[in-house]
Image (cartoon, rainbow, N blue to C red):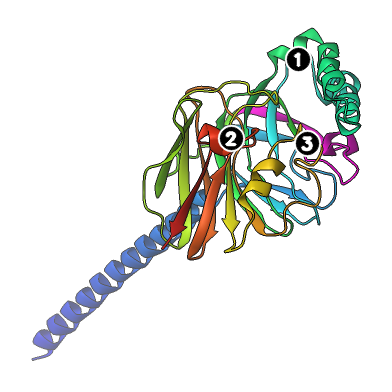
Amino acid sequence: MKTLFKETLALIIICCSFLILQSCKKDKKQTHSTTETKKEVIKKEKVIEIVTESMDFQMSDTIPSGWNTFRYINKSPQTHFFLIDKYPEGKNSEDAKKYVAPVFDEAMKLINEGKAKEGFAEFANLPEWFSEVAFLGGSGLLSPEKTGETTLYLNPGNYMLECYVKMSNGVFHTSMGMVKDVVVSNKDSGNSEPKADANITISSTDGIVLKDSVFAGKRTFSVHFKDQIVYESFVGHDINLVKLQSKTDLKNLENWMNWADPKGLIEPAPSDVTFLGGVNDMPTGNKAYFTAILNKGIYGLISEVPNPSEKNLFITFEVY
């Protein structure tokens, strides 16, 4: 009897030990799984924040290469965007301030005085190397107190951010100090290309083409630049997402999108629209993404070029 009791007790101890061991392994596995999930979430949420409070870009001086999502937070009372410029080797924001900004300032001054011919002739004074500047994307226009997200791919190198919206007196934000040098390092971000809810193509031949229906919520758009040309305002086509009102003056919005017009791209922006970001100028073949939270209503996709609707570069769509 004692022997049987001892054998039974031993069996119970062995079984309990086995169960405890399996439970520990399961707990470790769950802990490991939870840790991995947290890491994945952190990785997915990794973004580069840019904050504007006045005429500034508050952000890191060095960022990784590869795919990056830029979360642009406009805390200022003005409308802004950021455009990423790739200047020729050895040139930076100091060269832009010294050799480029004064030419644009003088040209705009003459245009504002009604001397458009003399104003555009002023651009002949730009340095020869300015023709080598490449525009590699950035955000679309963003209204005050709004946040936008733009995702794009950057190779290692030296870049510059700028915003050339105009003050109410016609002075460009760049001339007010809204430029910043940024180094893109050799270290890859490790981010993957996003998945889009809706797809946009843009070109000088077909204009803006939105290929999908758009529903309310947080939505990501892909933007494929089928081509790129320089328009009469010396800029290429881009994508700006804008929330329209029932009584929005669409012609006034179109006129405002032309910086070369004395009343264009100037503060205050039209009060009957809200700019929600987008993707700035990019070369032929490039692709980028932007994300926005959309409510039901009517929206527009518009390029910062003269007479965009005549070029099929202004379309409206409904969010369901």
Left or right, residue 196 beside residue 301: left
Q: CA distance from mark 1 to mark 2?
A: 20 Å
The mark nearer the N terminus, 1 or 2, is 1
Q: Dot 3, how many residues are within 10 Å of its Cα: few (below 14), some (14-19), or many (20+)?
A: many
x%, y% of residue 240?
Answer: 59, 44
The structure residue drawn at horizontal position 85% and vertical position 29%, both measured from the top left corner, is 111
Label ID, residue 164: 3
Given residues 235 and 18, the one toward you in this image is: 235
Mark 1 neighbour density, 10 Å: few (under 14) some (14–19) many (20 or more): some
**Residue 135 drawn above or below residue 73:** above
The image quadrant where one finds the C terminus is bottom left
Looking at marks 2 and 3 on the same chain, the residue that comes earlier in the sequence is marked by 3
Write the residue at 77% across / 57% down. 75
Where on the picture, by quarter, is residue 215? bottom left
Could you tell whether 225 is left or right of 30 in the image? right
In the rendered image, the vertical position of residue 82 relative to residue 206, given as above or below: below
The residue under label 2 is 238
Q: At numbered mark 1, what does the secondary structure look like: helix, strand or loop?
A: helix
Which amino acid lies under the numbered mark 2 shown in the image of this protein? Asp
The one of 230 and 91 positioned closer to us in this rendering: 230
Disc 2 crowd, CA 10 A, few/some/many (<14, 14-19, 20+)? many
Q: Residue furthest bottom?
A: 1
| Relative image position of residue 123 (x, y in whole percent) | 81, 17
Residue 45 seen: yes
According to the picture, the residue beneath numbered tag 1 turns out to be 130
Please say whether residue 196 is visible from this viewpoint: no
Q: Position of residue 55 (x, y in %)?
A: 85, 45
Horizontal side, residue 27 vs residue 68: left or right: left
**In the image, which residues are magenta?**
163-186
* Marks 3/1: CA–CA distance: 16 Å
